[in-house]
């Protein structure tokens, strides 16, 4: 890695620093996990290409604040008290309040939440939103919890992080394993402690308490908007395309429905239990009704053939949409994929090694930090509507979302062409550059 002469981050009075410093390379032990390494390696590769000031580069590799909590959680039987681990990480406080989802999953750890908070920083900067990145998580499988247990867990977690969240401070939203019901409990717990209603403490909340129209579908809608734009520039029309979607939750479910509404054949669909394949295309409403009536097991869906999640990713299709969890497209399967384009609904579904293989194979990847930014964009709309107490119609929200997604896509695409880099690298460059400029004008305290 090369040395730098002067620093963009230092105050002007001190800028005559004669000592060049090397680019940062160490991987801090506190955060070191596969997902954190992926996020930092993406940053390092991009920073190198951008010739980024090492002072800023190093600041961006670790979060500004990382809260680790453990708390007792009582099961419904009133006998068992478990100790649960949970996190709230704020990566970047330079741009405004921090923003990012809360994830409930049995594998959640500090490194994972930190990686997700970094990606939130880039995402907000790419979309020009006045937020830094944050993320939260509770290490628990939400599917093992009763409704009462889920509520108790959420309220206790909120109490544990209450000092670090707030409408001007850090604003959570739904992510994997959480939904608008969880957001309502967080809002209620926070408001009870403050003594007055504070709807702005979360986004992705129900409409009845100040949620925005279009928020629950925003991430999936943004994914499909990116798929449409990327398809337009690459001769893949959504109308008539074969699409495979991994994950049938908030993001994947909406993406599948909207793709189908635009004339695509959704030939493969999966969730955590497995998947189903029908070369003629699946009826998404029928799949949804069937899973509601028969439990989650998509592999048993009678109008399709059972496939495993691994097989699903390798199905022949035009567009593959990973919309479940991280680390799905790796050096083990990247050479076997049979899609023309990948649009990442999930965060971190593709490893660095797989990215290189896909680039060699000319498979276009629309990266997570661009493709799934629709969620935080409508969260921003929700925050703005809440501040003004003036609420927009669903059409208005969707139109504004699509306008912003289209212009972000084209700005990243243009940069990728100018610099001769992948869309992921261009998106990272765009986000990091905006943050660099903000850090430069703010300087260093004291
Ligand atoms: P969700 O909980 O609503 O749905 C997740 C889906 O993935 C479910 O169908 C689940 O069964 C499936 N799944 C879980 N583990 C799986 C596995 N091992 N293999 C295959 N499928 C599996 O979550 P979501 O909100 O749709 O989030 C999905 C992804 O999108 C996550 O990576 C999340 O970080 C990302 N994301 C979500 C939002 C949002 O607004 N909800 C925004 C940006 C990014």
Image (spheres, grey):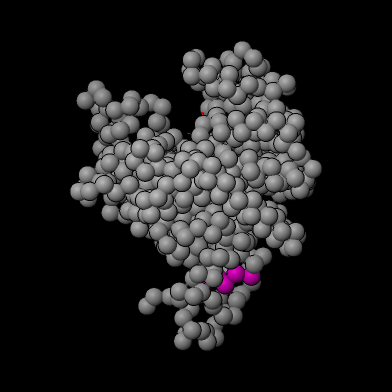
Using the image, determine if residue 61 lies above or below residue 298: below
Residue range highlighted in magenta: 51-56
Residue 212 vs residue 74: left or right? right
Residue closest to the eye, 431 or 408: 408
The image quadrant of residue 445 is bottom left
Q: Position of residue 67 (x, y in %)?
A: 35, 52
Residue closest to the eye, 294 or 235: 235
Q: Position of residue 24 (x, y in %)?
A: 54, 66
Q: Quadrant of the C terminus?
A: bottom left
Q: Position of residue 123 (x, y in %)?
A: 54, 54
Residue 326 visible (yes or no): no
Q: Residue at x 37, y 47 (%)?
A: 202
Q: Residue at x 41, y 31 (%)?
A: 141
Tell me how many marks there are.
0
- Taking the view exactly as shown, the residue that stands out farthest to the left is 195
Q: Is residue 243 magenta?
A: no
């Amino acid at each position: 890695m090369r040395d730098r002469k002067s620093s963009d981050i230092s105050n002007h009075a001190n800028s005559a620093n004669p000592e060049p410093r090397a680019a940062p390379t160490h991987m801090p032990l506190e955060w070191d996990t596969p997902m954190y390494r992926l996020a930092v390696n993406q940053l390092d590769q991009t920073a190198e290409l951008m010739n980024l000031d090492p002072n800023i580069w190093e600041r961006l590799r670790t979060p500004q604040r990382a809260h680790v909590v453990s708390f007792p959680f009582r099961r419904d039987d009133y006998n068992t008290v478990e100790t649960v681990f949970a996190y709230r990480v704020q990566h970047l406080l330079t741009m405004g309040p921090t923003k990012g989802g809360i994830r409930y999953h049995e594998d959640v750890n500090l490194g994972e939440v930190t990686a997700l908070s970094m990606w939130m920083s880039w995402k907000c900067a790419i979309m020009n939103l006045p937020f830094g990145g944050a993320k939260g998580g509770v290490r628990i499988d939400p599917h093992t919890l009763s409704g009462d247990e889920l509520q108790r867990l959420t309220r206790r977690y909120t109490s544990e992080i209450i000092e670090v969240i707030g409408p001007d401070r850090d604003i959570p939203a739904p992510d994997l394993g959480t939904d608008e019901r969880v957001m309502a409990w967080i809002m209620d717990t926070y408001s009870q402690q403050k003594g007055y209603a504070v709807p702005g403490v979360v986004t992705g909340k129900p409409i009845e308490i100040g949620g925005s129209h279009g928020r629950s579908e925003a991430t999936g809608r943004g994914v499909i908007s990116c798929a449409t734009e990327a398809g337009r520039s690459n001769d893949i029309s959504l109308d008539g395309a074969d699409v495979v979607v991994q994950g049938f939750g908030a993001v994947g479910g909406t993406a599948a429905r909207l793709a189908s509404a635009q004339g695509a054949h959704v030939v493969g669909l999966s969730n955590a239990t497995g998947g189903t394949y029908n070369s003629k295309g699946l009826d998404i409403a029928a799949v949804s009704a069937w899973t509601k009536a028969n439990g989650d097991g998509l592999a048993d869906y009678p109008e399709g053939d059972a496939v495993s999640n691994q097989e699903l990713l390798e199905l022949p299709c035009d567009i593959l949409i990973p919309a479940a969890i991280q680390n799905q497209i790796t050096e083990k399967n990247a050479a076997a994929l049979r899609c023309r384009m990948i649009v990442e609904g999930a965060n971190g579904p593709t490893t660095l090694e797989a990215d290189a293989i896909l680039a060699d194979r000319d498979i276009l990847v629309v990266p997570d930090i661009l493709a799934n930014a629709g969620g935080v964009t409508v969260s921003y709309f929700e925050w703005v509507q809440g501040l003004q107490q003036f609420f927009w119609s669903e059409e208005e929200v969707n139109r504004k979302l699509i306008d912003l997604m289209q212009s972000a896509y084209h700005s990243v695409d243009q940069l990728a062409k100018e610099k001769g880099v992948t869309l992921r690298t261009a998106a990272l460059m765009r986000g990091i550059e905006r943050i660099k400029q903000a850090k430069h004008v703010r300087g260093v305290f004291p």
